[in-house]
Amino acid sequence: MVKKIFAGIDEVGRGCLAGPVISCALILKENVNKKYIKDSKTISFKNRVKIARYIKKNSWYAIGYASVKEIDKYNIFNATLLSMERAIKKLKKKPDLFLVDGTHAPKKLKNSKTIIKGDQKIKCISAASIVAKVYRDHYMIKLGTKFPQYKWNKNFGYGTWQHLGALKKFGVTNYHRKSYRPVHNILFK
């Protein structure tokens, strides 16, 4: 009997005030040790980086993103689905079934199943979550070197008090999501 191939899909950055939304589509290789693969939110930054490195060596994966402009133009829901579509399109190996974290999968994706809290239940989704989160965190750290006042190296674009304070003091960058209420309110005071 042929074993079915599953790909996990997850996104990160939906709730951020700055930066893109990132998705990862990922198929774990059979020999991978799943012991450390769990929900990315429960792993420290340092350990996530190590685990992501291991996962990438032992999987087929692809990253997709939707830009800040796309988030503001299409809304975060549609931009997230767009980032998933882009990751799926780039995935070299094709699975029998895509397992998508959450309640919605891209409409064009016929062979999929959505799983609420999938990043806590399904290892290939957890692995996709880890890889996507590390990718996005590193992107925001690099971007933060241009804009150190927003502390993106620590908050990764989320609306922490430091980030909100910097927004009020220094204003909005091109990397901020202008359709998000805290940013929108600062722009149109």
Image (tube, rainbow, N blue to C red):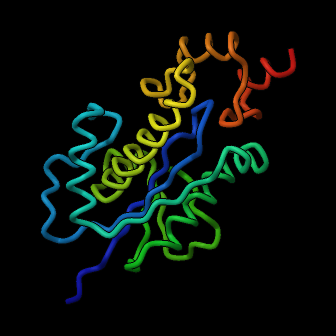
Q: Residue at x 44, y 34 (%)?
A: 141
Quadrant for residue 173, please give it: top right
Residue 66's place in the image compared with 163, above or below, is below
Q: Residue at x 22, y 63 (%)?
A: 57
Residue sticking out furthest to the right: 188
x, y percentage for residue 5?
Answer: 31, 76
Q: Residue at x 22, y 37 (%)?
A: 47
Tag count? 0
In this rendering, position of residue 20 left or right of residue 124: right
Q: Vertically, is 21 above or below 84? A: above
Q: Residue 83: percent from the left, percent from the top?
A: 58, 57
Residue furthest to the front in view is 146
Q: Quadrant of residue 120?
A: top left
Q: Please tell me which residue lies in front, 134 or 110.
A: 134
Quarter of the image with the N terminus is bottom left
State the residue lying farthest toward the bottom: 1
Q: Is residue 55 above or below residue 69?
A: below
State the quadrant of the C terminus: top right
Q: Does 164 sit left or right of 180 as displayed? A: left
Classify residue 151 as left or right of residue 31.
right
Residue at 42 percent across and 24 percent down: it is: 154
Q: Give coordinates of residue 33: x percent, y percent.
A: 12, 58
Where's residue 180, x and y in %? 72, 30
Q: Nearer the viewer, residue 49 or 106?
A: 49
